[in-house]
Amino acid sequence: MECQYCNNSCQKAGRQKDGTQKLYCRTCRKYQQGIYRNKAYEQRTDRMIVELVCESVGIRGISRILRIATNTVIRRITKIAVAIPKPSIRQNQPAFEVEELWTYIGRKENEYWLAYALDKTTRQVMDFVIGKRTKATLKTLIDNRAERRLRMNSQRC
């Protein structure tokens, strides 16, 4: 079999716990299976999850369409969300607005809030924080904005 990473030939390397053949590539030194049963290992899975989330498909709908577990979908969404970079800020930013959005995970008792800071003039998102609706969560957002402003002012001097 060809290696799915480097396209060189692989050699047999025993079996998995479920009995499927395990293969080893000497070139890239990676283990792999000959046939995968689930579709979560595919590289296009993350792209498909992002596209489906943008189309407002729910977590159970995504798992049904991609034929992967709901927990896998939630883990992948969390991994993708962590990788989103914070937007950069302008240097002379006099004021911003704070908005919030409510959602829940699993059931309505498990609610989360997305609080984000908007530039008043351009209406662009400057910063965001996700968590429970507490003063500490909003304080994190406001402190981040103030800290960034101070850092930008000290760099100018």
Image (cartoon, rainbow, N blue to C red):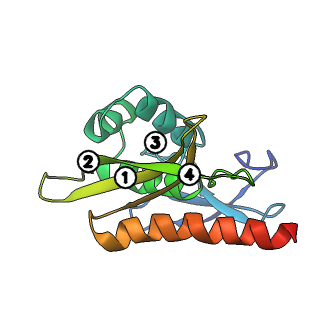
Q: Are marks 1 and 4 in contact (CB under 8 Å)?
A: no
Q: Which residue is mark 3?
A: 39
Callout 3 amino acid: Lys
**Which of the marked residues, 3 or 4, is nearer the chain's N terminus?**
3
Q: Are marks 3 and 2 in contact (CB under 8 Å)?
A: no
As rendered, which of 80 and 122 lies closer to the eye? 122
Q: Which residue is mark 2?
A: 103
| 81 is higher (above) or lower (below) than 124 | below
| Residue for point 66% across, 66% down | 148
Place of residue 141 in the rendered image (x, y in percent of width and height, measured from the top left): 47, 64
In three-dimensional space, the C-alpha distance between marks 1 and 4, rounded to whole angstroms, equals 20 Å
Which marked residue is nearer to the observer: mark 3 or mark 4? 4
Name the disc covering residue 114, or none: 1
In three-dimensional space, the C-alpha distance between marks 4 and 2, rounded to whole angstroms, equals 27 Å
| Residue for point 75% across, 55% down | 91
Callout 2 amino acid: Thr
Residue 148 at least partly seen? yes
Residue 16 at least partly seen? no
Left or right, 151 with respect to 48, comes to right
Q: Which residue is mark 4?
A: 95
In three-dimensional space, the C-alpha distance between marks 1 and 3, rounded to whole angstroms, equals 31 Å
Which element carries disc 4, helix, strand or loop?
Answer: loop
As rendered, which of 80 and 123 lies closer to the eye? 123
**Which of the marked residues, 1 or 3, is nearer the chain's N terminus?**
3
Place of residue 151 in the rendered image (x, y in percent of width and height, measured from the top left): 73, 71
Callout 4 amino acid: Ala
Q: Are marks 2 and 1 in contact (CB under 8 Å)?
A: yes
**Which of the marked residues, 2 or 1, is nearer the chain's N terminus?**
2
- Total marks shown come to 4
As rendered, which of 116 and 63 lies closer to the eye? 116
In three-dimensional space, the C-alpha distance between marks 3 and 4, rounded to whole angstroms, equals 47 Å
Which element carries disc 1, helix, strand or loop?
Answer: strand
